[in-house]
Amino acid sequence: MLTVDNLEKTYDSGDKALKGVSFEVSGNEIVAIIGPSGAGKSTLVRSINRLTEPTGGRVSLDDTEVTGLDKSALRDVRRDMGMIFQEFNLVERLTVMENILSGRLGYLSTWNAFRRNFPPEDIKRAREILSRVNLEGVENNRADELSGGQRQRVGIARAVIQRPKILLADEPTSALDPDTSREVMSLLTDIAHEDDIPIIINIHEVDLAVDYADRIIGLSDGEIVFNGPPDDLDQAARDEIYRGGESIADREEPSAGSSTGSDDVIAERGD
Amino acid sequence: MSNSTDSWSRFDRRERLLRFFGLLAGLVILVAAWRAMEVNYGYAVTAPRELADLFGRMYPPNVGYSREIVGPLLETINISILGTALAIVMAIPVAFLGASNTSPNKPAYLLGKFIISFTRSVNVIIWALIFVVIFGPGALAGVLAISIRSIGFTAKLIAEAIEEIDRGSVEAITAAGASPIDVLIYSIVPQIKPAFISVATLRWDINVRASTIIGFVGAGGIGVPLQTEINYFNWEAVLTILISILGLVLISEAISAYLRKKVM
Amino acid sequence: MAAESGSAVEGSWERPTVFYNKKVKYLIYGLILLFFAYSFWNLRISPSRFVRGIGAGVELVTSMLPPAYTPSQRDLLIQGIVESIVMTIVATTIGIIVSVPVAVMASNNLSPKPVYYVGRSIVAVTRSLHELIVAIIMVKAVGFGPLAGVLALAFKTIGFFAKLLAEEIEDIDRGQMEAITAAGGTPVQTYLYGVLPQVMPRIVGLSIYRLDINLRHSTVVGIVGAGGIGITLLNSFDKYDYQFSMAIIAVIVAIVMVGEGVSALARRRIQ
């Protein structure tokens, strides 16, 4: 179970991205975080595994308090949290197999990592996951030879091979076309049910969130303004999340989440 | 425009004056420079004839002599390769210091930048002079001169490649719980590998040329017999050496270009 | 590789290599290592000599510091630097004037095949020989002094300048040339109005760049007697006057850095 308690993040620039966010995720729940760009969605997901260092509050995974761990202990707890990225974040020049196996690096000694010497069970599992994400036969291809949808499935495979206790997905569909986005979302829901792990998905397409999520968290200006099942997300709730002139433009612009030049994203990239 | 309709010029009066004085200033500097050299006009006038005369004495090349330069040529290649290899070994840490995204702190970054620009600013022959004083004449001084001179160039280009890496995959591998060394092996190294190989081969190509002259100050290679033969006025042997250097340089250039194309 | 299956290979995976297979790869690595070993052996580089050298190096560095010069040495230093700068200016000018026709000869779109090959050969020869080799020959031909240096630097300028200018000429828009020819222009007029304006910015940029390179070279050609500060440096080494050597090197480094800075700035202004 993941517990987020009163989480805060203030960037060096003074921007308050998160103003005390609290929620819990457990079981094999799929939680979608929605909200206008600049609301702090990305900061929230990235603060959970401390890719972005939160400035206040607590995150706990089961009995481990993630916030407050030293570097080495943080690495250990990160092995239990798989992450999927908007731009896939694969090592383009490495093969698909190496990219997937890189999810096991937290369990490998440096010497074995240097020799690319992964245990046979990891390789066997990598092959299983490859077929699970419908990518049989491409293990020797370089990642930059694949299409966007294929790359994201490699990204998912890399997260799954960690045997994580939870999956974090930061805008996993923003760089994909609508059909591929749906494929990726249904793949993620399948994984949640088959592996019995919860997934937190930060997403800007409300329709996708409603169709695939078990619960929706609406974030506005660094605060949770909605937390409930998709069926409860009525027009009033949507207006509450997307209030203000800017937010309407965000909804109409389908790639607002990916191409936004807001300070929020820039600050996060610079982290 | 003050021009009448039946005349046209590309520049107006002010521009023409500026261009005129610019040209004039250039010419004055040139003439002043020429005069400052205090050239003996006798020499200057006969220079073309002297050169032609020299090439006349060089031709035909001494074919039999070519057997004697095989050793020095091999030594030249060895110096260039060892020098380049050593340069790369030393340049890698410098590159990580001199790249803004991997440098541990500001003083380290400045140190990296300083090493890069200092080693680059001192010509290889000066480095060779220094190392001949330290290690005595011979190829060791040559290898070190070549390698130290190459640090700046190699480290600068590798540092640029490091600065251009995609942070995304670094982040992704970090998020999987990997250590910084794992991140280096799995994300940074694969990303800079092509730049690394092309920098290494390009520098090797440059170093082959440099290895042909460090012998002038006693640092080994084909430069040693070249200087000897020139001092003894064995011009036919000199031409043999020059042709061999030409061949060596053209071959190394072709190999280097082929390797660089291959890794792209 | 992808076709292989069964339990034996499921737990193993080999990274595809640019060489044909693993054995070839290790063979090539082995050969490279052998070559390095041979190089060490051939150059008679022994560790003991290296270690002895370290001590001598420390001694040399201490005898070099602090850099110093007597008043008469200061005059020598200034004289040498002025001579280097003067040589740079004259050599660059002569080199460029000679380079332009060579560049036209060496561009395949303006020259008939035989002329083109002559042009390319001139470029290849002038590029391949190191400036010090050219300088040492020029010294034998025209005697010690800056004239030999000027000829050497001008010779080297041709290889550099004509090659890059020829590449620029090969990229020009032929339409502009044809327009002049079609209007009844003579070949000379065609070059002046159809070619020159297109490559003029490149000529200016390359000239400034080459001025910078020639400045660097002018500080060392004196080592073989071709004028400039180099001979002063060599003499100081021969007289074991290392403090003066250090002073000269410091001045050379300063001049080279200033030249590089000015050159980079000027080229950026032009673009």
Image (cartoon, coloured by chain):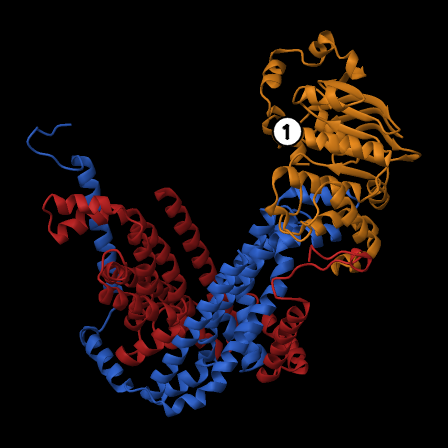
Q: Residues within 10 Å of mark 1 (few under 14, many from 20)?
A: few
Residue furthest bottom in the image: B64
Residue furthest top in the image: A236
A179 over C218 or under it: above or below: above
Foreground residue among C38 and C262: C38
Q: Chain A is which colour?
A: orange
Q: Amino acid at mark 1?
A: Asp
Q: Residue A145 vs residue A10: left or right?
A: left
Residue furthest left in the image: B6
- Residue C124 pos. (x, y %): 34, 68
Evaluate whether residue C64 shows in this view: no
B215 over B126 or under it: above or below: below
- Residue A129 pos. (x, y %): 77, 44
C41 over B83 or under it: above or below: below
Foreground residue among C204 and C4: C4
- The quadrant of the image that shows the C terminus of chain A is top right
- Residue B112 pos. (x, y %): 61, 55
B73 over A52 or under it: above or below: below
- The quadrant of the image that shows the N terminus of chain A is top right
Chain assigned blue: B
User: Which residue: 17% across, 34% down?
Assistant: B12
Would you name the residue on which mark 1 appears? Answer: A179
Q: Regarding mark 1 in the picture, which secondary structure is present there? A: helix
